[in-house]
Image (tube, rainbow, N blue to C red):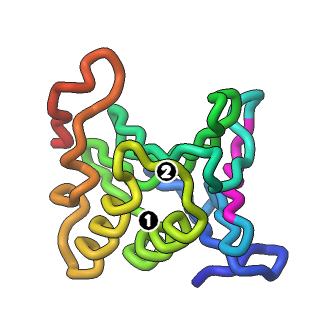
Amino acid sequence: MPHSPAGGDALVFLVLDAGATGQVAGTLDVASGLLSPARRTWTVRPVVAERRAYVNLKVHRTGVDLSLERLNGWRRAVVPLIRLQKGHEASQSAELFQALAAVLERHGPRDPGRAIPRLAAQGRHLAEGNAVRSSPLTALPGGGAFGFLATDWS
């Protein structure tokens, strides 16, 4: 399991965009469940994975993100899971997906969309050596007003 810069156990999410060179997109502290995105705004801030938070998978034009949101919706933490673009595909590691699912399961945030089992399935899919484009998370419908339409990742 990757370690945080402070020396404690943490899951480290890397930036997945084309041209990224190992920059950190965020961390999840294993003990406390604190998801800390590297880029912060007024509403995008660290959030603790607890009973008052929701875990969601956000599907968009270029990939899938993990979003952990406070119950009132005023604060959320977002980190990238998959990036699929023409000529570029990237994913967090199988080990990270499996550890992420275990940590979230232990801390118990609300999971109305069944994101945690999907994260575990993604980890198994990648551990078996399968391609990112055929993974369980890429089969999710897109978000927004046209979320019911299938996303074409080609």
Q: Residue at x 33, y 32 (%)?
A: 61
> Which residue in the protein does label 1 denote?
92
Q: Residue at x 19, y 25 (%)?
A: 148
Q: Within the magenta stretch, is there residue 61?
A: no
Vertical position of residue 22 compared to residue 113: above or below: below
Q: Which residue is drawn at 24% across and 49% down?
A: 138
Which is more toward the observer, 113 or 27?
Answer: 113
Where is residue 66? Give x, y as percent: 48, 49
Q: Earlier in the sequence, mark 2 or mark 1?
A: 2
Which is more toward the observer, 6 or 69?
Answer: 69
Q: Which residue is drawn at 67% across and 63% down?
A: 33
- Would residue 58 be found to the left or right of residue 42 on screen? left
Q: Indicate the quadrant where residue 50 lies.
A: bottom right
Q: Indicate the quadrant where residue 143 lies.
A: top left
Furthest-top residue in this view: 145
Q: Provide the residue span drawn in magenta.
A: 33-40
> Which residue in the protein does label 2 denote?
80
Where is residue 37? Give x, y as percent: 67, 50
Vertical position of residue 13 compared to residue 150: above or below: below
Could you tell me the amino acid type at mark 2? Pro
- Would residue 93 be found to the left or right of residue 4 on screen? left
Where is residue 82? Give x, y as percent: 38, 53
Could you tell me the amino acid type at mark 1? Gln
Res 148 label = none
SS at mark 2? Answer: strand
Where is residue 103? Give x, y as percent: 55, 71
